[in-house]
Image: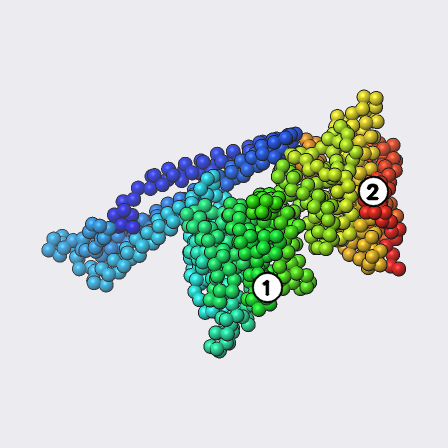
Amino acid sequence: MDFEALRNAEFGPLDTAVSDWSRLVRNLESMEKDARDGLKRRAAKANWQGINATVSRQFVGKTVGEFTDARTQASSVRNILRDTRDELRSHRRTLEEALDRGSKRNLTVVATGGGGFTVTMRVHPDRAGTGTDPSAHGEADVLALRDEVQEILEAATRSDDTASDVLRALVDQSEHGFSGASYGDRDGAVRAVREAAALARLARQNPGDLSVKEFDRLLAGLERYGDDALFAERFAAELGAAGTLEFWTGINDPGHGIEASSRGGNELMRERLTHFDDLQRHLGLTLAHATQSDSAAMSDWKREMIRLGEQPIGPSGMHQGFQVMSNLMRHGDYDDGFLKQYGDALVEAEKQHGDGDGKAPAAWHNLGLDPRLNHVGPDGGSDPFTGFMKALANSPDAATTFFGETFRTASEAGGGSSVDNFTYFFEQRDWPSDLDSEKQAGRVGRDMMAQALEAAVTGHPAGELPTVNTPAHGAEQARLMERVIGSISEDPDRLLNHRYMADSIGQMTAEYMPDVHRGLHPATESNTRLFPVAGTAAVFESDDLTRVLYAVGRDPAGYAAVTMGQSSYTGNIMEYHFRNPEANISDPLFSQPENLKASIEGIANIAGEIQGTISAGRAYEGEKEEGARNAEYNTALEKSKVWTSATIGIGVGIGVASIAGPWGIAAGGIAGTASNEILNGIVTGSLQDDASQVIYRNGEEIGDTRDSTFKAVEMAAEEAGRLSGSPSPHIVAIVAEEAGEGFNTAHTKISEILGGQKIPDTLETK
């Protein structure tokens, strides 16, 4: 910064800017509150129908999010401007103090033009007045004042330049809309940018030369700053796409270990190999955050990463770019646009180098000698679709889009039928072998694919539960869920031969409980009233559901997910009907209490059928394994206690304007909901001294599950009536009978559909 510019600086414009931004922040805070408490809350309570249930409701949610991002970005800009103004004022004050001290020694600082300055005497000895000592300074004083002024100007320049740098970086984060990057002061943003540049330099060096100390610094920095928007963008941009791939390949290349050994010891491999999983995780999270940036540098990074997908990477060239990058995509929420382009290019590589009918390219197979690219799971990371599917599992919208896209057109199939990505990956692909501890080729890849499907059809990341803010199922999601159910029904071995997918399939089924109930209930006009659905309803065939529920029931995790989902839904939908008489079955010949009774009976019947079907799968598994897996089922139910957390208040997609919102009765919390009582009974039942309180726990005989089903629906009806203020002992008294009818219906259908198979009466060890 020029001497004159700092000395004569006018801070009025900066004061005005800080004041204006502060006022903008206050206004945006008010608008954000109105949007969140007004617009979003009203949207949540609205009875959305048709396209409004998906497009409009989702738009409202994104709009409210934009208000939040706008307020966050405005706050960051204000804080950076305020800090910079205060620092520049401080620098000018320090300059004035230095000039004042120099004046007392007959020294002054004069601008020389072009930003320079010189230190000279204020009064020449020849012009000194009486009593003035113009020689009150020496050469050391002149040099000291010069150096002090220069340091002040350099500090002021750093304040100005770094403020400009971080403000530009902040604005560049989002091409449209606003960035969610938040900084309480300028120094925090500056530190993030500087650390990013420093760590990128570390990662750009020869990986074989990376010391333990440098490894530790790199890992600590990524762990600390990985979710910082400016850090992530600057780190990825400065490292570059090629640098990213070369770093991860190089650090895992055994050749570097040989080189290190020849120099006296493979220190990094020996001392830090157990921390490579942490590095992979935090590097992936940082890159995911970086891809959310719309900066020109990150746009180049994304294009270059895709271009390098089929290029050999590293000194050995044993892996392609797709294989390296996919292993870094297992953690974090990558930009949807990047995932689409990356996925399209990866699919094209699969088609070009595989046989197109399911056999993956030879390069994707792990030969056992390849450098290990993955440290966060049992597979070695050779199949790029494993990591990519995990990335989709964290990015629901991208997952939905991916599975609906075409893998092979009719013309590519030689005149046959076109094949979409769902059909290819779920039904046709021969997933390549990997270094799986379970010795099942392709196990991890298929499991990741099931998680990606879970995200694709539910609208939230796999492994999580939906919340009141999760949009209703859209048309693409519903159609894909129909495909999943139809595919497993067509060939149950698609699940049974790969049961590690059952937890995801079970979760998906649980979150489509309204649609499942419709599919099992006889098709009548009352169906939409009895089991309302927000958004687009998935349409299932009754026999398809029976086959799938039976198959899911044969796995403990799948059984637990459906049990918890069905139990929650039963409690919530019963409470909904107790509280909303106008939503009950409408028969003009019935009184309002009789219509309510008919509704609750219908719900209890389908609840019984669902439990009867999955319990039959559990019973078959128990007979086949001679009761050995019974403990696994109970453990799975115990682990499912997450269903009793706050998010269970959504009612697993009731999807109507009920008590507190379109996603369910307890949008504002679960306290006092009917489903909460049942779920607590399920996960804590084994701890009760009174055996009558045990729900779905023993399972040693089919009768145990039947009795648990009766108990659960009775509890749901009783709690629903009590909480609605209109208890009905009469209804409670008859729901167990209806559940029993549904339970028997399930076993009859299974015998018919599965060729006369008899359901075992007991799960006890023979």
Report x, y in % for residue 88.
35, 48
Q: Residues within 10 Å of mark 2 (few under 14, many from 20)?
A: some
Q: Residue furthest front?
A: 415
Report x, y in % for residue 236.
46, 54
Report x, y in % for residue 659.
70, 32
- Label 2 residue SS: helix
At 84% from the left and 45% from the top, the residue drawn is: 751
Q: Is residue 425 left or right of residue 32?
A: right
Q: Quadrant of residue 361?
A: bottom right
**Which residue position holds label 1?**
366
Q: CA distance from mark 1 to mark 2?
A: 44 Å
At 30% from the left and 41% from the top, the residue drawn is: 10
Q: Is residue 68 visible?
A: yes
Q: Residue furthest top?
A: 588
Is 450 or 25 nearer to us in this picture? Answer: 450
Q: Amino acid at mark 2?
A: Lys
Q: Is residue 570 visible?
A: no
At 41% from the left and 36% from the top, the residue drawn is: 20
Vertical order, 419 against 107 (above or below):
above
Is tag 1's residue or tag 2's residue first in the polypeptide sequence? 1
**Which residue position holds label 2?**
749
Vertical order, 599 against 113 (above or below):
above
- Label 1 residue SS: loop
Report x, y in % for residue 499.
72, 54
Is 206 or 229 nearer to us in this picture? Answer: 206
Quarter of the image that includes the C terminus: bottom right
Q: Is residue 283 left or right of residue 720?
A: left
